[in-house]
Every structure is written in C-alpha cells, then in structure tokens.
Amino acid sequence: MSITSAALSPTQRRVLVALKRKGDATAGELADTLEISSSAVRQHLRALRSAGLITASQDRGQPGRPADRYHATDLTEPLFVATDSSLSVELLEHIEEEDPELVNRVFDRRRRRLVENARDKLTGKTVAERVDVLTNMLDEQGYLADCEKADHNRYRINLHSCPLWTVATRYTQACTTEVEFIRDLLPDAKVDRVTHKTAGAHTCSYEILFRTQN
C-alpha cells in the first residue's frame, strides 16, 4: 500500500508534520499536540504505518506498559515536495552525462538566484529578525523549519523536512548549496551544519553564531 501527498487526509498530514517536527512521539503526545482523541490518532497511525510512512519503537523508559513511539520514515520526504524531484534527478543525470561540471554550475546558479531573491528581505533588520525571516523563508520552501535561540548571539535552525530529498540523496551539491545559501545571507555569522538527514538524523540543523549582536 502506498499513499501519495494528494491521498493524505488533512489529519494524516498534520500527524506527519507533528512527527517530523518532534522527531518521535507517542499516540498520546500526538493527541495532545493535535487536540484530537487518542483513538483517532491511533487509527491514522495504523494507516500511515501500513503505508510505510512511519515506524514505531517501544519506549521502555516509563513505568508500566511500554508505549510505542512513532517516527516518520524517509518515504515521507517526497510528500512535502512541491516539484517533481524524480524528473529533476532525471534531468540532472542527462546533464551529468553531457558535462559533469555543468551540474555544479546548475546548483551554484540556483543558489545565487535564491540569495538574490532573498537578500532584500533581510536588509536593515536586526540579528534576531534576520534569523526569523530566514527561518520563515525556509519553511515556505517546504523545509518545515523552526528556530531556537541558544544564547544572546547563537541560534539553531532545524529543518524537519527536505523538499530536495530525492535530489539530495543522489547529488551532494544540493546539501552543499543549502549551507552556502544560509552563509551568503548571514555573512556576519559562523554557520555550521550539526545534524544531517542524509547521514541518518531526523533533521538538518544549522548552528549560527553571530560575531556581533545588533
């Protein structure tokens, strides 16, 4: 059984988004987050698990009967992609056959275009405002992005989904240009990727340390 993005019910999509943002959760935790009944959540979890979109492991850290903790699988990534990534990969493969170096130039040109389109939105804003605007832009692009502030000049942006997943698993340039995009928009900050979805983490997370605070 398979579920496409169009076939997901609104509640099933909310369940997946909650799982991707949390990393993992029990049915009870999801019910609290989504403000629906536990029985309704479990019904959706069964359908999503049958489709291979989630897996479960037992949480033995709590007293009493172990609860199942649910995790979104890699099969969920294409469900949050706005474009046809399989076609993108096919086109990139054709380009690579003709000229491997041209693939690098394609990714670099895409990065520069994204930076040009985004730069004005950050001009004249404070550090906190720029991070907030950047996070919102990434969220709008399908990354399910959020941000947390560690201290007065350190932030962490978490990307819970990858709209380029199919491409990124084939071409590492997608990941390289992603971090370069953030660095280009925050030139006064040190940006490091501290977790990586293609390496098995449930998020791509970037630690951002500003050299000055404004």
Image (cartoon, grey):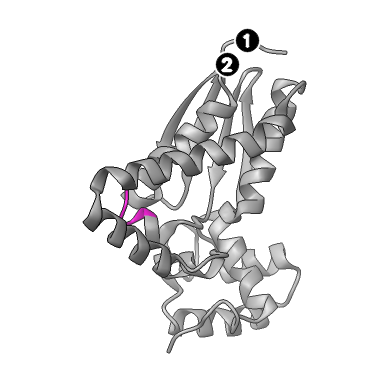
Magenta portion: prevailing SS class = loop
Q: Is residue 152 left or right of residue 114?
A: right
Q: Give the total number of marks visible in the rendering.
A: 2
Is 158 in the magenta?
A: no
Residue 73, percent across and down? 42, 66
Q: Is residue 199 visible?
A: yes
| Residue at position x 62%, y 72% in the image | 13
Q: Closer to the camera, 50 or 187?
A: 187
Picture quadrant of residue 153: top right
Quick one: quadrant of the C terminus? top right
Q: Identify the disc placed on residue 204.
A: none
| Residue at position x 47%, y 49% in the image | 203
Q: Is residue 138 left or right of residue 174?
A: right
Earlier in the chain: of badge 1 and badge 2, it is 2
Q: Which residue is mark 1?
A: 212
User: For the residues marked 1 and 2, what is the alpha-carbon distance in whole angstroms?
Assistant: 7 Å
Residue 150, percent across and down? 60, 26
Circle 1: residue type: Thr
Q: Is residue 200 visible?
A: no
Q: Is residue 198 left or right of residue 99?
A: right
| Residue at position x 24%, y 48% in the image | 100
Q: Closer to the camera, 93 or 208?
A: 93
> Is 137 placed above or below 31 here?
above
The secondary element bearing badge 2 is classed as loop
> Is 35 placed above or below 95 here?
below
Q: Which residue is mark 2?
A: 188
Circle 2: residue type: Asp
Q: Kindly indicate whether the residue at mark 2 contacts the one at mark 1 (C-beta within 8 angstroms).
A: yes
The secondary element bearing badge 1 is classed as loop
